[in-house]
Image: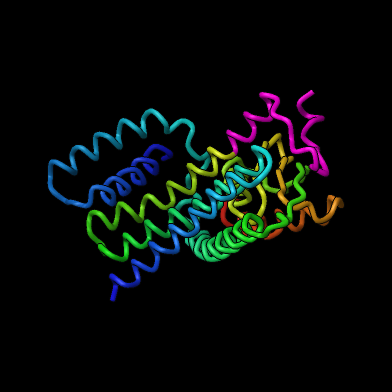
Amino acid sequence: MKYVTLFIIIFVLWLLITFNIEIPNLIVGAVAALITSLVFGRSFLKDSKKFFQPHRYFWIIVYLFIFVWECIKANFDVAYRVLSPSMPIKPGIVKTKTTLKTDIGKTFLANSITMTPGTITVDIIDDEFYIHWIYVSSKDPKVYTDKILGRFEKYLKRIFE
Amino acid sequence: MSNTISIIFFIIGVVFDLFGCIGLIRLPDVYNRLQSATKSVTLGTCSILFGLFIKYGFSAIGMKALIAIPLLFFVSTVAAHALVRGSYIFGTKLWDKTVIDDYKDVQK
């Protein structure tokens, strides 16, 4: 089941990238997808059933909009810090705890954190995230956990768990 | 019409990539510089690619540009994570005005 899901994803990606539907192209794509899915299928998602539950796709779309909005905010934030003459930065590495359980959820959360205003994920150890923050506005773990992780955690929980 | 919109996206992209480069020069240490380098890519390079998609529509070039956007997201975030962690383990010092460092307990 795992292998089939991965095969379908890779094959569709191949079709989109090459963007032509001639027989030789389809054969090359199928062979390449087959080899890739055989090699990497083992380390793919643990239960691929989640791929066929439509309500998850709804939350992915909601999440995408929030994510793009945060990205745009992040860019203006960086532009402001870089261009202002006094450079308002106060960097530090903080420790936060997540409630997500699955590996893929954590990966997406870490990637989202890197793309949001002023934060980069340094390391993940079990359920603790170490985050480099360009402007540490408070030293209370509750406040900053909510500020950094809270935005995405609730959506990712619906998508991946 | 679509030509004009795509040119607007190109200009936004180039301007934000320029901000990222200025950040690389101005900010004090590796960690802060990576912040500016990864974030400017999202609106900078991705909006150049999106402008390309608008210009060519659903053709071979346009689809390639559109698929490059999510790939760029994953690659740049993972690369930033690897660089930050690598330079910390290598022993690069944080900026001397850094206020808090929780990560140093883990490294011992």
- The quadrant of the rendering that contains the C terminus of chain B is top right
- The quadrant of the rendering that contains the N terminus of chain B is bottom left
Q: Which quadrant of the view contains residue A59?
A: bottom right
The segment highlighted magenta reads B81-108
- Which residue occupies 43% across, 56% down? B46
In the current view of this chain or complex, which residue is farthest to the left? A23
Q: Is residue B80 left or right of residue B52?
A: right
Q: Is residue A27 above or below residue B65?
A: above
In the image, residue A116 lies in the stretch drawn in magenta = no
- Give residue B43's position: percent from left, percent from top: 49, 58
In this rendered view, identify the residue nearer to me: B64 or A98. B64
- Give residue A22's position: percent from left, percent from top: 13, 48
In the image, residue B93 lies in the stretch drawn in magenta = yes
- Which residue occupies 60% across, 42% down? B34
In this rendered view, identify the residue nearer to me: B93 or A73. B93
- Which residue occupies 53% across, 53% down? B40
Q: Which quadrant of the view contains residue A66?
A: bottom right
Q: Which quadrant of the view contains residue B60?
A: bottom left
In this rendered view, identify the residue nearer to me: B100 or A26. B100
In the current view of this chain or complex, which residue is farthest to the right? A140
- Give residue B64's position: percent from left, percent from top: 30, 51
Q: Is residue A125 above or below residue A154?
A: above
Q: Is residue B49 above or below residue A36?
A: below
